Amino acid sequence: MNEQLLYHIAITSIPNIGDITAKKLIAYCGSSEQVFREKKGVLEKIPGIGGINARKIIQHKTEALAIAEEELIFIKKNNITPLFYLNDNYPKRLLHCEDGPILLYSKGNAEFNNPKVISIVGTRKATEYGKSFCDKIVKELKPHHPLIISGLAYGIDICSHKAALKNNLPTVGVLAHGLDKLYPSQHTGVAKQMIENGGLLTDYKSRTNPDRENFPKRNRIVAGLSDLTIVIESSKKGGSLITAYIANDYNRDVFALPGRLNDSQSEGCNNLIKINKAALIQSVKDIEYIMGWEAEKKVIQNQTQLFVELSSEEKTIVAILSKQEKIGIDELSLQAKIPMSKTTAMLLEMEFNGVVKMLPGKLYKLV
């Protein structure tokens, strides 16, 4: 495992080889290790790689592996869990994001594949209006047992983490630097509590400073990890708006808290709603309506009646659907261990019988 991880880390250490290019290299070569073993002539023939990138891989091979060796020592010493995009422990929602990181570093006990994951972002200069709503919405979300994601920054970010901890909900801070430090340092105490119920996550190696350009890049992880993003207060420009637009690009739902027209900290949210990039949110009921959630589901009682008429394979599908709000047909077929063609036919029959409902994007949920 350590040898494989060594090459996973090394490929992220080659200059100008981003996540999309790295995935392409791994797909064509078969593994991270093989990328470093291929000859320059083979690498440059891979579509989208070319001579420049192939030369960088060859030239920086030794340096990248040395960096990876040091990172392995840091990971082991600090009880950090690496999440490689082809491994089972990688956050599944990020697999649907083309630019999702090929490697993440996690500290804590977070379940990133929680059935419900919600990102909460907003201005660093939060008003009492924003902070009060943040506390309120997290408390209202408690019956759904979601994982709360944010960026551990000042303002709305830290408010959402504290609210989650207060309501005994797991919460994860996505960092714009390595796990050898914490920025801002004033949030160290909260971060320690989060590691006990949630954790910290980053795609940056140790010794990476919280440079300004890292934060917009970090925001793609915040958006990609979750089913929906809530924006609570934002000025006309800001990092939370970047997160909202990325979430839109990922086809994830976005909600925004409206504010008075003359409030500068509500200008960004009001505009998101105005241009139909976010749904207006006043309470958890707005999320439940748009996402198809219910605070108290009666799935078990419904299943008791359904099982009388369902086949064993149909019962398996119902059992899987009962554990999550919606699921794609590919994943459903995989979890049920039923061929895709048969799963499709069964879902069609079950839809006719009012057992399941098909949603946009070939997603299914229990009725």
Image (tube, rainbow, N blue to C red):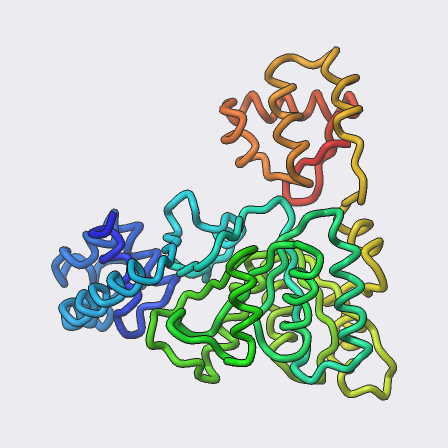
**Position of 115 relative to 126 (above/below):** above
Instruction: Decide which of 69, 257 is in the foreground and name it.
Output: 69
**Position of 363 relative to 130 (above/below):** above
Residue drawn where x is 14% and y is 72% of the image:
59
Instruction: Decide which of 166, 203 is in the foreground and name it.
Output: 166
Residue drawn where x is 65% and y is 75% of the image:
241
Instruction: Decide which of 253, 73 is in the foreground and name it.
Output: 73
Q: In x, y percent, where is residue 311?
A: 65, 12
Residue drawn where x is 64% and y is 26% of the image:
319
Q: Does 102 sit left or right of 34 as displayed?
A: right
Which quarter of the rendering shows the C terminus?
Answer: top right
Residue drawn where x is 54% and y is 26% of the image:
336
Q: In x, y percent, where is residue 16?
A: 31, 73
Q: In x, y percent, where is residue 228?
A: 67, 57
Instruction: Decide which of 201, 356 is in the foreground and name it.
Output: 201
Exactly how many numbered labels are in the figure? 0
Q: Does 150 sit left or right of 156 as displayed?
A: left
**Position of 299 relative to 210 (above/below):** above
Q: In x, y percent, where is residue 269?
A: 76, 75
